[in-house]
Image (cartoon, rainbow, N blue to C red):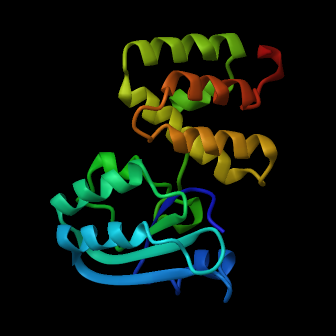
Amino acid sequence: MIRHHALLLQGKSFTDSEYFTRDFDSTSEYEVFHFETLSIGEVRKIIQAAYVKPFHGEVKTMVLEAQSIAIEAQHALLKVLEEPPLTTQFILVLNSTEGLLPTLLSRVMQPADTSRLPRTTNSFFTIFQTSSYAARLDVISRITKDKDVSQIDLLRDGILWYLEQQPPTPSSAVMLDCVTKLNLRGSSKKMLLEEIALTLPITNPETK
């Protein structure tokens, strides 16, 4: 199953994707919605449906396939992606990410093997990953005090990239939980990032 509350896949159909054949089976509970252009009215219906508990199991997946998403619909979708129901995961399937709001892109994970272009980490995260624990905490103190959203986003994206490359472990589960909670309103970004900083392995042993 997916390890993030919202994924973005590029393509025409979820069921034709490699991600579907790898991570879903006949027992998975999911609903697929098809749209030419996803409107705000349709998003409101989707949000209502998202809060309906699954019939089987603990979590259901709502798949939204669309050619495009109206801007006002993207803003409405942001709210449920920021505070997702505990019983619902989302998968957006689009031909292209062109026209998507940066804030919407920041709320979803794009698996490396489903993107048209290779997904790579960023230099800010690379430096963070190779820094000592003390240096990481200093960086987090600075960017959270300054409310530097761009660098917080770079850290979050780098962590998601890192988690995509790793097999599931207790440590990766902790980091995924923290990075998911970064999107929740009222969460302490400083505490969550500090937990990640102390959990993420240092790639260069000489910096420990």
Q: Which residue lies furthest to the right in this view?
A: 205
Q: Is 190 displayed left or right of 34 in the figure? A: right
> Is residue 144 shown above or below 69?
above
Q: In this view, does 48 lie to the left or right of 205?
A: left
Q: Seen from this angle, which residue lies furthest bottom?
A: 26
Position in image of residue 155 (x %, y %): 52, 32
Of residue 82 and residue 153, the one placed in the foreground of this image is: 82
Count of picture labels: 0
What residue is shown at x 39% (from left), y 37% (from top)?
A: 185
Residue shown at 71% from the left, 46% from the top: 173
Q: 8 left or right of 199? A: left
Q: Report the residue at 62% width, 64% height from top.
A: 2
Q: Is residue 162 above or below residue 113?
A: above
Is any atom of residue 7 visible in this view? Answer: yes
Q: Nearer the viewer, residue 196 or 95?
A: 196
Q: Can residue 121 be seen in this view?
A: no
